[in-house]
């Protein structure tokens, strides 16, 4: 597994901005980074996702880590790299996508649910595992899976996650979270996104400190 862990110097919180448009790219990412969420994923089923990623990269530089979600094909990995994206997130396990991501020196976070998928992903070079949908897997089942995974595995819970579920997942040693509709929905005002992000960061920091 790649030791270049993007979570080492950033909160392990991924903003999943499904449905975001290029016109919102700078303003939404700006309030997220200012609040303390600096890993940002633009799902490819959003309007003009590559343009949105490119605008974020150009606007923020190294202040954030940007990339794509819902990446299903190798070709899309190339396109994300071309616009400056650094992370590739998928809802599923596709070993070809993982291997292409690593060939291009990008960060791979495939979606997994079973022990077989976890080990296939890690064997293919995945940097972290996205447990999706986390709401269906549940904490006790993740705990059982985590017991057999390599000690340095980075695990992210995604799907049905909110600040209210942080404590129970952290208790079973999850490493981080992906936040979707609880943080951002199309049409939401920037000020509302800012307040949600600030609250999420405050809750996460309180959980870690307690």
Image (tube, grey):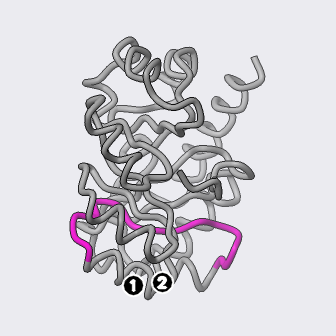
Residue 64 on the magenta segment: yes
Q: On the picture, is 94 further left or further right than 52?
A: left
The residue shown at (35%, 83%) is 79
Name the residue at 46% across, 77% down: 104
Which disc number belongs to residue 194?
none
Q: Mark 2 = which residue?
A: 54
Q: Residue furthest top?
A: 140
What is the span of residues highlighted in magenta in the rendered image?
A: 60-74
Pick the front one: 76 or 182? 76
Identify the residue position indicated by label 1 in the image. Answer: 51
Residues 82 and 201: in front is: 82
- 56 left or right of 16 in image: right
Kindly state the secondary structure of the residue where label 2 is placed: helix
Q: Nearer the viewer, residue 124 or 93?
A: 124
Q: Is residue 150 above or below residue 196?
A: above
Cα separation between marks 1 and 2: 5 Å
How far across and down, in percent of the image, does residue 199 sit? 62, 37
Mark 2 surroundings: few (<14), some (14-19) or many (≥20) residues within 10 A: many
In the rendered image, residue 123, in percent from the top left (x then y), is placed at 38, 48
In the image, residue 42 lies in the stretch drawn in magenta: no
Residue that appears at 44% across and 81% down: 81
Where the C terminus falls, by quadrant? top right
Front-most of residues 133 and 30: 133
Residue 112 horizontal/vertical position (percent):
30, 40
Above or below, comparing residue 83 to residue 187 in the picture: below
Q: Would you identify the image quadrant in which residue 129 lies?
A: top left
User: Which SS class for mark 1?
Assistant: helix
Q: Position of residue 198 (x, y in %)?
A: 65, 44
């Amino acid at each position: 597994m790649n030791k270049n862990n993007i979570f080492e110097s950033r909160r392990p919180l991924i903003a999943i901005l499904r449905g975001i448009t290029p016109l919102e790219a700078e303003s939404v990412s700006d309030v997220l980074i200012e609040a303390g969420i600096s890993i940002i994923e633009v799902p490819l089923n959003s309007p003009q996702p590559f343009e949105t990623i490119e605008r974020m990269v150009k606007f923020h530089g190294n202040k954030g880590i940007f990339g794509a979600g819902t990446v299903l094909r190798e070709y899309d990995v190339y396109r994300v790299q071309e616009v400056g994206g650094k992370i590739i997130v998928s809802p599923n396990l596709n070993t070809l996508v993982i291997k292409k991501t690593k060939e291009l020196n990008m960060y791979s976070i495939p979606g997994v649910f079973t022990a077989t998928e976890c080990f296939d992903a890690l064997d293919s070079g995945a940097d972290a595992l996205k447990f999706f949908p986390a709401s269906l897997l549940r904490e006790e089942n993740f705990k059982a899976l985590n017991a057999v995974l390599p000690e340095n595995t980075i695990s992210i819970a995604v799907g049905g996650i909110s600040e209210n579920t942080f404590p129970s997942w952290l208790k079973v040693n999850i490493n981080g979270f992906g936040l979707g509709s609880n943080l951002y929905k199309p049409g939401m005002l920037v000020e509302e996104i800012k307040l949600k992000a600030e609250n999420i960061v405050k809750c996460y920091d309180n959980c870690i400190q307690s």
